[in-house]
Amino acid sequence: MKSKFLYLFIAAALLFSASNSMSQVSFAFGPEFGINLSNVSVNPTATTDSRTGFIIGGIADINIGKVMGVTSGLRYVMKGYTTSQGNTTFKVKLNYIEIPALLKARFPLTEVKPYLLGGPVLGINLAANQESNNGQQSSNTDVSNSIESIDFSLLFGGGLDFKIATKTSLFVQFGYQLGLSNVLKGQTTTTAKNYGIQITAGAKFNM
């Protein structure tokens, strides 16, 4: 008999905890803009230079309580790199739609709230072009058939939320994105993986 009361007590406590957590769930949405300093890590080793591109999209925060949350969204991200062979320079431009799924840990201060985040990112390649220039002539070639359509990566970073009104805040964010996938289609002896430093800012509106 006592065990039944114990089970009922535990079940009631779990239900209360779940309902209390759900009552603290909040949502925030808004635009995000920034720059991406991208490059690739190549194996066998090759010298490459970075490409500076833009990031534009929307961000969605699901806040669970005062500390934990999940961040997602939809972003257009410009990536790529530059390399040289002899007198010819090749600039590879890769453009993606990305969907992040990041865990977010906030430090619940007053009007300014620092946070850390990290998790996987799914990238869908939209376009791939290669510009070549040997000093005398240049060309632009579509190399989409040589680039994988899906790119998986991990994103780690942090930022600051600035509360400017009851349901409105601004944010600045810094992140490092580490590619996990070989972006070269059909290649087994050579791999190239995207990576980059991202600096973004935007606004969020609480629902």
Image (tube, rainbow, N blue to C red):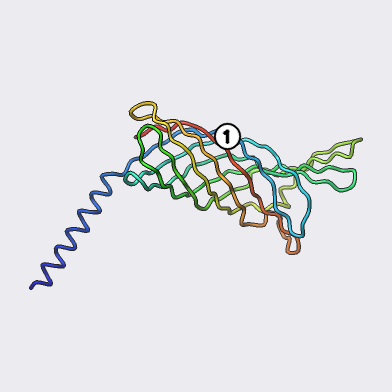
In this rendering, position of residue 66 left or right of residue 161: left
Q: Quadrant of the N terminus?
A: bottom left
**Location of residue 185 with respect to 24 vertically, above or below:** below
Q: Which residue is drawn at 52% across and 33% down?
A: 201
Residue in the foreground of this view, choosing between 162 and 80: 162
Q: Which residue is drawn at 72% across and 51% down?
A: 145
Q: Residues within 10 Å of mark 1 (few under 14, many from 20)?
A: some
**Location of residue 197 with respect to 179 vertically, above or below:** above
Q: Position of residue 164 (x, y in %)?
A: 39, 26
Quarter where residue 42 is shown: bottom right
Q: Where is residue 146 in the image (x, y as percent from the top left)?
A: 73, 52
Q: Quadrant of the C terminus?
A: top left
In this rendering, position of residue 46 left or right of residue 71: right
In this rendering, position of residue 140 left or right of residue 56: right
Quarter where residue 142 is shown: top right
Taking the view exactly as shown, the residue that stands out farthest to the top is 165
Taking the view exactly as shown, the residue that stands out farthest to the left is 1
Q: What residue type is labelled 1?
A: Gly
Q: Residue at x 87, y 43 (%)?
A: 88
Quarter where residue 35 is shown: top right
Taking the view exactly as shown, the residue that stands out farthest to the right is 136
Q: How many marks?
A: 1
Identify the residue position indicated by label 1 in the image. 34
Q: Which residue is drawn at 67% across and 57% down?
A: 182
Q: Where is residue 70 in the image (x, y as percent from the top left)?
A: 41, 47
Helix or strand or loop: what does disc 1 sit on?
Answer: strand
